[in-house]
Each structure stands twice: as C-alpha cells, then as structure tokens.
Amino acid sequence: MIVLPYMIIYVTKDRERAEGMPENERYSILSGDGTESTLELLQNSNLPKDSNILVFKNSIQIEKLCREKKWRLLNPSAILSEKIENKITQTEWLGDLTNFLPEHSITITKNINEKYPFIIQWAHSHTGDGTLYIQRENELQEIIRKFPEREVRLTKYIKGPMFTMNIVVRKDDILLGNISYQITGISPFTENPMSTIGNDWSLPHSILSKNHIKEFNNIALTIGKKMQPEGWKGLFGIDVIYDEERDKLFLIEINARQPASATYESQLQAEARGKGVSGITIFEAHLSALTNQPISSKIIEINDGAQIIQRVTSKITDIEPVDLANAGYKVIKYMNTKLNSDLLRIQSKLGIMESHDKFNKRGKEIEEQVEELVK
C-alpha cells in the first residue's frame, strides 16, 4: 500500500472506475446514481477550495471548472491527452515511432481506395466504437454517404489476437502493468465486431512467446518515455495486435487516460498481495505518480483473472444475471442506455478464455446465461 501526502477526491460517473483502491482518510470517491456525468457531478458539488480532484477522463470543460472553483486537478492536461490519443494527430506526435503502427495512411472517407478488407479509425474512439471493419463496397459507400469529408486513419486488416497493457509514467521512470488478452467483438456481448468487451490476464503467456513479451514491453516503455518529457504523469494504456501471418506485434491504440481495466487489475493485484505477494498495484502506482511520491516496490505480477462486459445492444437493454452472482462472479450494473455502452461488468478471479476468441468452461457459463436471458 502507498500513503498519500494529502486527500484526493476521485469524481466519476461510474464508481467502479475509482475503486482501484479502498477509500480511506486520504482517498474518497464522489459519484452519483450513474446518470450524472463527471462534469455535472463537479458542477453540483460543494467541494471546498483547494480540493485535490482526480477524474477518469479529463476535458477542457472540467479543467475550466476546476480553475474557477480553485480546485487542483491532478490529471494530465486535456490538450496533451487529445494530441496523443487522437488517431490523426497521434501519427504526427509519434514521429519516428510510427513504425510501431501497421502500414497506414491518413485520408478523408470519400477518397478511400483500399483493397478489402481494411480498418477505418476515426480520430476519436472508445472501446472500439471508433474502429470500423470494412469488408465490402456497400459498407464503405454507406460511410461515405454519411461522412464524406471526415478524416480517417486507414490500415489493412490484421488477423490475430489483441492485447492490452496499463502503464504508469512517473517523473523518473516507467512502470509496466500486466499484459491482458483483449476480448473483442463476441456476440451476444456486443453487436460491433471491433468493440472491446473485456480482459483476460490468464491467456497472454499461452499465445505470446518470451520474445513477443519483450517486444511488447519495448513498445510500452518507448511510448512512455516519449510522454515523459511532455509532462505526462500517471496511467495510460496501449492496445497491441499480434499479426499471426508476419509474427509481429503492432501498436493499434494509445489510451491517454486511465484505462478502464486498471481498476480490476488493481483489485486482482491487491488480492495477490493479501496472499503474500509483495509490491504495489497499478492504481497505487498511478496515484504515486500524480502526487510525486517516491516508491520502492515493484508492480505486482498477476497471471489469472478476467472480466467481460455486456454492452447495450438492440436486443439487450436491461438484464439481471442473478445466477452469475450466485455462482461467485462479481456483477456490476451500469445505468447506461446508449447503444454499445456498458450495461454489465462481470468479473471472475479466474480466466474465462481457453484460446483466442474461444471461451473456456467459465466463459461459456457466462455466455450461456446471457443468451438465456435474451430469449
């Protein structure tokens, strides 16, 4: 555990995002019923002047309000976050590091002339919503009809599994979290084939070799070191795809913010520590970086645990998987109604994937119950 130098108030629409460590005398969570945005929660709060505020995702509006209220916002600047995360400006920001990306080009939709299949990435995305898998002409023409002048990043479709890592940038070093397999696009959890729906920390070492992991860590460290001199502190995440045909890893996304998976990774790490494993969690490392606190412990390694998200779909808008909770899974419900937003977060202390895109017995148990509730 770390000891914070002063009180931090984490303000968030979704309380789960802030539960990377328990509340204590120097860490508290301000959230509502899940219907108010973080900005609205801040606007409606009576927090005293000089409060130390932390949010899940920073914005220009949140920064402006914090200045007006004389609150100290701990998150890195919203402008820097936008420059790094935006798929268009990111290519310029990466500079020589664009070799980490797959072969790509920047264009506008009406000028796309690419061999199928290929991937379109809008400037902004969240959990895969800004990533489109284009397989045929009618799909492209529909996008051109809707957004003829929109700028996009184009890449060829790469066949292979996706992986993620949560990383902490500190003033003098970079701390790497644990690689997780990214569960993507499986029905009935989402209707978007490119949508992220969960993480499994048990699978990476079954797919990735020691050399792959070394390559992955190099990408993470290099990106972190580039963010360091620009003033970034705290968590960010990367999504990496393993190209099965070329036996190579490619950077797909940089999430210049606290990734959603950092909370459960930290809870799994805290549980490991309770069983005698020494070290700190990725969330504790995040807070230590934001408050400039020295640390001497390493990040706790984990190799098990998973979570899967049921998103709002055209068929699934509200379900209560009581049997999963009774079976020992932790189920978190969200108040979202927007298509493909989080509806349920189902967490398991053990892995749920047998291999790429294939559930094991636990994963099938979750899948079957969700499918049964849809009928």
Image: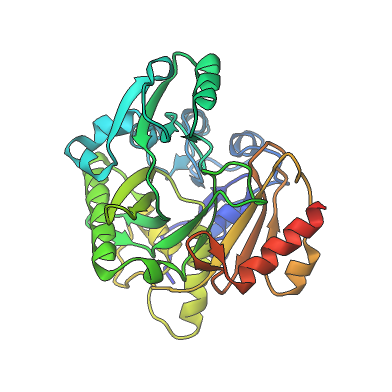
Q: Residue 257, image x and y in percent?
A: 43, 45
Front residue of 323 and 270:
323
Displayed quadrant of residue 75:
top left
Q: What sort of colour scheme is used for the picture?
A: rainbow
Give percent across and percent down for residue 96.
17, 38
Name above or below for residue 131 compared with residue 20: above
Can you give x and y, in whole percent of width and height, for residue 71 in the image? 49, 39
**Quarter of the image that includes the N terminus:** bottom left
Residue in front for this viewpoint, 303 or 48: 303
Residue 264 in the image, given as x and y percentages of width and height: 53, 63
**x 27%, y 63%: residue:** 212
The answer to which quarter of the image holds residue 168 is: bottom left
Instruction: Name the residue: 68% across, 58% down.
Output: 332
Point 23% across, 38% down: residue: 98
Q: Is residue 153 visible?
A: yes
5 shown above or below 113:
below
Q: Residue at x 46, y 32 (%)?
A: 124
